[in-house]
Amino acid sequence: MTTTDWKIEPVVDWLLTDGRKCQDLESIASGLAGALVATGAPIMRMVMTFRTLHPQFAAERVLWERGEGMISHRRSDHGIWNTDAYKGSPIEIIVKTGEPFHRKLKHLDKDRDHPVLFELAASGVTDYYGLAIPFTFHRQSTFLVNTDIPDGFTETDIAKFNRIVLHLAPIVEVLVTHNIAVGLLDTYLGPRTGKKVFAGLIKRGDGEEIDAALWFSDLREFTRLTESLPPADVLDLLNAYFEHVHTAVTVYGGEILRFIGDAMLIVFPVDEDKEIEAARRDACRAALDAAVDAFSSLAVLNRLREREGKPAIRFGVGLHFGHVIYGNVGAPGRLDFTVMGPAVNRTARLESLTKDLEIPLLLSQEMGLIAAVPVTPRGEHMLKGVAVPQSVVSYTAFDEAFDIDAP
């Protein structure tokens, strides 16, 4: 069989049947490469790249290579556009010009050709062809194929690849758009809440009642810092604090629901698949462990900040366990997905009490009992908005680790 003998129809049939059912980019790449190989297309390597919309990643690449049929899915950060790997590369040329890129790799020119082409030639590639995947909203995406047959691709091969990409485009555009939507929901709402919104909890009043351990934390002396620091330094401080707490709580299943100025509201929901008492205990202990980790690693962070001439990060944490409403609230056209209920207010008031008692971590007596861990009584206190005094405790293990005085 010569390279021009392979048929495009089986590949298009696969795209229109099994291909359109693929739910991720790895599956569509693997299936498409398999269909191309099965019909005799002369490919040894296939790549699809997509520009995305995510605060951490600028682009993603899905790579298939002949042999074991391995699929590699890699995400690149926002600095990718300024790297030597991207500048002057075939992908950049395709994206900037909108035109296909075709290069035989037998006689490369160091003054003209990008280093990636030399690397591919050294691995046995003889021909490189790529073109833009035409998306409706012009999001930058490319389809690239390489071969190792001696004479490279024919014009007939190129024409077939062009036709295949027209059928591929609407399928991968749906997947890329879906990934962007999920990523943005995860970023702005959190993974757990984002899934609920994406599943259809979108109307005002939609929601559910849940049991959860609640975390409320607040930066110390933030008002003074905002008055004395340049705005850029204030943002740097906030971002460092938010990232620090986020790192600590996510390991234990916590999800940030809201940033409220310099405060954070975080939820550790009860696992409904577990026995209820064990699930309640585990949620409380997860919040406690996250708090210990956050304060334990804070000293290292503050030493680094001190070396850079930046102010130290200090914050307090209030923890409580309770029954809350978890859902949509707001105006008809502008909603917020959050938790509401008396338990939320009490958690915030406990955090305020950490300043008065000069103990950075306080919890309600109820949470201490549910967590079934040693606690130190810190007296009964009136909390704003709560009619009767509340018993407040501290976490004994935390007190001992951080030399908190006994009452």
Image (cartoon, rainbow, N blue to C red):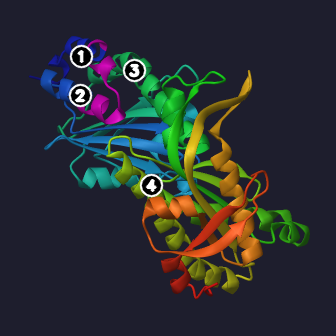
Amino acid at the residue labelled 4: Ala
Mark carried by residue 283: 4
- Determine the residue positioned at 40% across, 57% down: 282
**Is residue 371 toward the left or the right of residue 376 in the image?**
left
Q: Is residue 2 magenta?
A: no
Dot 3 lies on which element? helix
- Rate crowding at label 2 as few (under 14), some (14 to 19) or many (20 or more) other CA atoms within 10 Å: some
- Rate crowding at label 3 as few (under 14), some (14 to 19) or many (20 or more) other CA atoms within 10 Å: many
- Determine the residue positioned at 51% across, 78% down: 396
Q: Earlier in the sequence, mark 1 or mark 3?
A: 1
Q: Earlier in the sequence, mark 3 or mark 2?
A: 2
* 235 and 193: which is toward the camera: 193
* 366 and 49: which is toward the camera: 366
Disc 2 + disc 1, Cβ < 8 Å: yes
Amino acid at the residue labelled 3: Ile
The Cα–Cα distance between marks 4 and 1, rounded to whole angstroms, is 46 Å
Q: Quadrant of the N terminus?
A: top left
- Tell which tag, 2 or 4, sits nearer the viewer: 4
Q: Which residue is mark 3?
A: 171
Residue 390 lies, in percent from the top left, at 67, 61
Disc 4 + disc 1, Cβ < 8 Å: no
Q: Which residue is mark 1?
A: 14
Highlighted range, magenta = 16-30
